Amino acid sequence: MILVWLILIPLVGGVVAGFVGSRNVSACRWISLVALALDAALAIGMISQHLGGFQYESSKVWFEEFRASWIPVLGISVHLGLDGLSSLMVLLTLFLGIIGVGASWSEIQERAGFFHFNFLWIIAGVLGVFLALDLFLFFFFWEIMLVPMYFLIGIWGHENRQYAAVKFFIFTQASGLLMLLSILALVFVHRAGTGTLTFDYSELLGTQMLPAVATWIMLGFFIAFTVKLPAFPFHPWLPDAHTEAPTAGSIVLAGILLKTGAYGLLRFTVPLFPEAARSFAPVAMTLGVIGIIYAALMAFSQSDLKRLVAYTSVSHMGFVLLGIYSFNEFALQGVVMQMICHGLSAGAQFMLVGALYERIHTRDMGKMGGLWTTAPAFGVAGMFFAMASLGLPGLGNFIAEFLILVGSFQASVPATTIAALGLVGATVYSLWFMRGAFFGPNERGWTIVDLNARELVLIAAFVIGLVWLGVYPQPVLNAVAPVVQSLEKMTQPVTAALLRS
Amino acid sequence: MTEAQFVALSPLILVGLAALVVMLAASFKRSNGLALGLTLAGFAASLVSLAWAAKVAPVQVTPLILIDRLALFYLGLVFLTGAAVALLGHGYFEKRAGYRDEFYMLLLMATLGAGVLVATTHFAALFIGLELLTISLYALVGYTRTEPRSLEAGLKYLVLATVSTSFLLFGVALLYAELGTMEFGKMVDLIRQGGHRETLVNGAIALVGIGIGFKLALVPLHMWTPDVYEGAPAPVTAFVATVSKGAMTAVLLRLYLLVGGAIPDSVMTLLSVIAILSMFVGNLLALLQDNVKRILAYSSIAHLGYLLVAFIAGGNFAPEAVTYYLIAYMATSLGTFGMVSVISGREREAEELRDYAGLFWRRPFEAGVFAAMLMSLAGIPLTAGFIGKFYLLAAGVDMGAWVLLGSVVINSALGLFYYLRIVASMYAAETSAKPGAAAREVALLGSATLAALALCLIWLGVFPAGLITLIRSAVLGV
C-alpha cells in the first residue's frame, strides 16, 4: 500500500497546489515542497529498511509489492513493485523533484498554481513508471507524464516553446504507440502459448516465441525507450525540449525523464527478450557510440548554454546504451551509476544555467564572459559540475563511465576505444562551457548578484551527492547487485541456450 | 401485438410520444424551458423503460424490429446522447432569436429514427429509420434560418443525403429482386447458400455500402462533412457527429455479427483501403484548417477510419472494440462540439482557432474540460479515448493487421499535431481574438452537461471494467 501512497501524494499535492496557487503563490510552492518532502521521507523510510547497513538480502526479488485488480476482463491489474533499481530511481526522482520546486521559486511568477500542478503530476507519472509491474499500467504512466510536461514546456518555456513542446510530445507519443503495439503483441503471443490473457510483468517473463517474432516485438520497446533515452537517430526532440523548457522542466527532463528510457531498457527490453536483445547488441552498441561522439561534437559547436548542456546529455546517455548492451556486471553497474550521476550533474548544470538566465536574460555564450569575477560562487559551482560532467576522478560520473568502459571493453574493444574518445570530447566541451561563460574579459560589463542562500543550499545538495557517489559508491552498487546479476545471467549464451531447449 | 412486444417497443414509443407532446405544447405555450423539460422527461421515460424492456428481451416485434440486448444497449446510448444534445441546445438557442421549440421536436424525431436504426433487422425498417433521421436532420442543420451558412449546409445535406439514400434504396431493391427477402438474417443465409447471380448481389451490396458509408462519412464519401459541420448550429453538429454515426455503426455491427466474420477477401481489401484513406485524408486535411469546427469535422472522418480498423481486424475483440471506441468517440465529440456551443456568443459561433486564445485563463473550467476532450480524441491515458484506442490496437494485434496498425500509429501522431494546436491556442496570450465570439454569460445547463461528460470520460478512462462487462453482455447476446 505504501507504494500507492508514493504515487498518490504528489498527485493529490498537485491538485491542492493547483487550487491554492491562484490565491496564494507562496503557499502553493510550500505545499508542493511539503508534498514532495513527505513523499521522500516515506520513500527513504521504506527503502532504508531494505538497503540498510549496506547489506542486501537477495532472497526476495521485490521488497515491496502491491497488487490489486483493475480491469480483470483483460487481465490487467495494478501491480507495483520495488527492487534495488527502482528504489534508486525513486530516490533520484524525489530528490530532483524537490530541487525542481526550489529552482523555480523565483523563476515562475505567472500561473504558479498550474505550474506546480503539472510539475507534481510529472513526478507522480515518473514514480509510476519506476514502480509499475503491469505492462498496461506501465504504459499508462509512461503516457501520463507527457501531458504535464507538454504544458510545462509550452506555457512557461522560452521563445520557441510551442515548437519544442509539440516536437517533444509527438516524438514520445508516436514511439509510445509502437511500444503499445509491442506490449499487445507480447501479450497475445503469451496468450497463444498459455491460454491466459495477462499484462503482468512476472508472468510475461520467459514467454516462448520464435526469434524473428521476438526481434520485432523487442524493436517496438527498443525504439520507444531509445527515443526517450535518447540515442542517436531518435534524439532531435531533446535539444529543443531542453533548451526551451523552464529550469525545473529541464531539470526533470534531463534528470529523470531520460532515465525512464534507460530504466525501460533494463527492466523490460532485456529481460523480456534476452536472446533478441543479445543478437541486437552490436546495433545498439554502435548507436550508443555514435551518440557519444556525435553529441559531444554537437555540444562543442553550440553557443546557447542550455543547448550545449542538452547535447552533453545525449552524449552521456550514449554511454548508458553502450553499457546496457555489454551485458556484464561492470558495465551494468556503471549504467546505474551513470543514470544517477548524470541526473545530478545535468540537473545541476541546468539549474545553474537557469539561474544565470534569470539574471542576465540570455543564454548566448557570445554575450557572456568574465562572470567569475562578478559572481565567484557561480563560477565555482559551474567549474565543479563541469568537472563532474567531464568525469573527474573523485566524483560519481568518473566511477560510472569508468565501470561502463571496463565492462564494454570485454564485450567489444573497438566500440570501447571509440567511446573513450568521448571522454576527450567531454573535457573539451566542459572547458569550452567554462571559458565561454566565466573566464575571459567581462566585455559586456556584467555585474550580477551571486548565488543566494536558496540556490546555495540546492547546489550544495548536488555537490554532496556527487562527491559521495564518487568516493563511496558501494551502497549503490550493493543495491543494484541482484538486478545486475540476474540481467547478466539471463543474457549469457549458456542460459539463452537452456531457455531455448 | 402481444404484451411482451409492446413492452419491448416501449422505449421507441415513448420517444415518439414525447415528440408529439412537445409539438402540442408548443401550440399552447412557446417556451424554451418547457420544451426542454418535456424532451428530457421523454428521454428519461424511455431510458427507464429500457430496463423494463430488458426483462422481456430478446423480442421480435413484427418482422421489422428486434429488441435484443445489442439494440437495448445502443438505444440507451442514443437516448443519452440525444438528451445531452437537448441540454446543450437549450443554452445555445436561448442566446439566439427565433423559435426554439421545434428544435426539440426535430431532435426527438431524429433520435427516434436513430433508435429504429439500431433495432432493425429488416431493410424496410432500416430505410424508415434512416429517412426519419435524415429528414429531421435537414431541418435541424438549417435551423438557424437567418444565417446563410446554416441554410447552405442544410441544402447541401439535403441534396447529398437524398442521393446517397437513393443508392441505398436501389441496392436494397436489387437484393430483394434477387433474393426475395429484406430480412438481414435470411439474406445472409441465402447469400451463403449461393445459387444467385453473384455480380448482381455484389453490386447491390456495394450500393448499400455507399448509403452506409455516406452516413459514416468515410472517404471518398466524406465531402459533405466539413461544410455541414461548419454550417450547422453547434449542438446539431454534435448530433450529426454522434447519434447519426453511432446508429449507423450499430447497423454495421449487427450485420457484421450476422455474417460472423465470413467476409470475402476482396471486400476486406476494399474496406482496408477505405479505412486507411479515411485516416490519412481526415488527419491531413485537418492539419490545414483554422476553423475549429472544420478541424473536428475532419478529425471525425479519421476517427471513423480508426473504427473501421477494428471491424476489419475482426476476431474476438472486434465487437467490443468497436463499441468501446464508438462510446469514447461519441462522448468526446459531444463534448467538443458542445464546448463550441457553450462558449459561443450571441453574434456568432466561436469557431475560429483564435477565438480560443487565452481561454485557459479566461474560463479555466471550460478550457480544462475542452483540453480533456481533445486529449481523449488523441487517445491519451486517463481518458476513455485511450481505452478505445487500446482496444482498437488490441483487436488489430490479435489478428495481425500490421499495415492498418501502422497507419493508426502514423495517424495518431498526425492527429496529435492539430489537437495540440487547439490546446496551445487556449493557453496562448489573448491578443488576437476577434470580438463577438465569446459568450458573456455562462450557460449553466450546458456547462453542467460538459462537466458530466468530462467526468464520464475520465471515469471510463480509469475504470473501464464495468462498461466492458456491459458491452460484452450486449454484443455476445446476438
Image: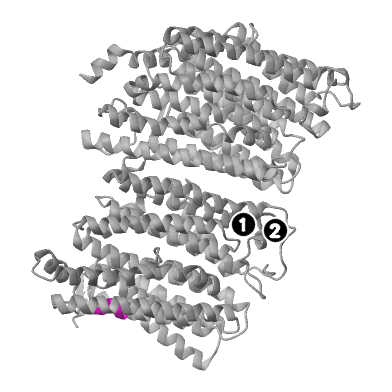
Q: Looking at the image, which is closer to me, B234 or A127?
A: B234
Q: Residue at x 19, y 61 (%)?
A: B259
User: What residue type is disc 2 on?
Assistant: Arg
Q: Quadrant of the C terminus of chain A?
A: top left
* Residue A2 position within the rendered picture, expressed as x and y whole percent measured from the top left: 48, 30
Crowd around label 2: few <14 · some 14–19 · many ≥20 (10 Å): some
Q: Quadrant of the N terminus of chain A?
A: top left
Q: Which residue is mark 1?
A: B367
Instruction: Please tell me in which quadrant of the rendered image residue B179 appears.
Output: bottom left
The chain containing the residue under callout 2 comes to: B
Furthest residue toward bottom: B28
Q: Is residue B458 left or right of residue B466?
A: right
Determine the CA span between mark 1 and mark 2.
9 Å
* Residue A12 position within the rendered picture, expressed as x and y whole percent measured from the top left: 57, 41
Which dot marks residue B362?
2
Q: Residue at x 29, y 25 (%)?
A: A206
